[in-house]
């Protein structure tokens, strides 16, 4: 009987040691997972701060008289910024009949737009070729249905198609964008 008590006590002690062992391994596991994660996080923050730090090129250098020195890159950027100011060409209003949602229903589409052009030469080209541009637009717009221009997706597709058609009409000149000021369906 004493032997049975001793073996039970030994089993209880082994069980206690077995319970301590998983607790220690959980602590070790936590240490092996959390500590590297913290280190990686700190390194990421330090790297981000280094990349977001001050830009040496943005500092203004002064000459001996205290006047700012403009680098060649800054001068070129200023020239490009001035050169890229867009010009706009006002198109005349266009009125066309379009098909409604019901068969045989006729609606009137009124569209007012401006064309964004890169230079004065394109404006001269547009003036000379305006009848061709309007013809291309009217032929396209007459084939539209109300469903084609509903919603923002329809408006976007309409702008893309109008841009494509004007660029085909004035080739080799180029129009940058079509800006729709008014789109009315009655």
Image (spheres, rainbow, N blue to C red):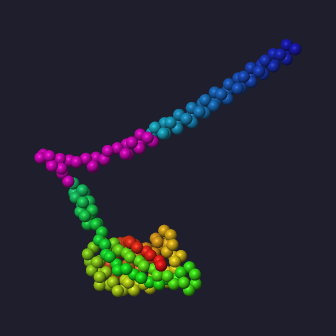
Residue 66 among those drawn in magenta? yes
Q: Decide if residue 168 is on the left or right side of residue 84.
A: right
Residue 12: % across, % down: 77, 21
Which stretch is magenta? 44-70
Give left or right: position of 26 versus 9: left
- From the viewer's side, name the closer residue of 146 and 37: 146
Residue 168 visible to an observer of this rendering? no
Locate residue 80 relative to residue 12 in the image: left or right: left
Instruction: Locate residue 46, reporting x and y percent.
Output: 41, 40
Residue 56's place in the image compared with 2, above or below, is: below
Question: Residue at left 42%, top 84%?
Answer: 138
- Which of the 4 image quarters holds residue 52? top left
Q: Residue at x 72, y 22 (%)?
A: 16
Q: Position of residue 156 (x, y in %)?
A: 46, 71
Q: Quadrant of the N terminus?
A: top right
Number of dots carrying numbers: 0
Q: Is residue 58 magenta?
A: yes
Q: Residue at x 18, y 50 (%)?
A: 68
Q: Is residue 127 above or below residue 117?
A: below
Which residue is outermost to the left? Answer: 65
Task: Describe residue 15's horizontal placement relative to residue 149 as left or right.
Answer: right
Front-lying residue, 69 or 98: 98
Q: Is residue 156 visible?
A: yes
Question: Which residue is more in the foreground, 111 or 47?
Answer: 111
In x, y percent, where is residue 64? 12, 46
Where 133 falls versus 3 (above or below)? below
Q: Residue at x 81, y 18 (%)?
A: 7
Query: Residue extending furthest top?
Result: 2
């Amino acid at each position: 009987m004493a032997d049975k008590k001793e073996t039970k006590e030994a089993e209880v002690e082994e069980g206690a040691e077995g319970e301590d062992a998983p607790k220690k391994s959980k602590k070790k596991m936590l240490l092996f997972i959390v500590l590297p994660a913290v280190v990686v996080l700190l390194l990421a923050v330090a790297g981000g701060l280094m990349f977001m730090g001050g830009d040496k090129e943005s500092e203004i250098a002064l000459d001996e008289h205290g006047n700012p020195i403009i680098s060649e890159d800054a001068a070129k950027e200023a020239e490009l910024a001035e050169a890229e100011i867009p010009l706009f060409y006002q198109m005349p209003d266009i009125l066309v009949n379009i098909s409604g949602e019901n068969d045989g229903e006729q609606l009137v589409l009124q569209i007012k737009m401006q064309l964004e052009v890169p230079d004065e030469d394109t404006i001269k080209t547009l003036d000379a070729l305006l009848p061709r541009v309007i013809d291309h637009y009217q032929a396209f717009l007459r084939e539209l249905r109300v469903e084609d221009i509903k919603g923002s997706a329809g408006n976007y597709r309409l702008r893309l198609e109008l841009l494509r058609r004007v660029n085909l009409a004035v080739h080799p000149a180029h129009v940058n964008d079509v800006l729709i000021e008014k789109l009315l369906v009655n």
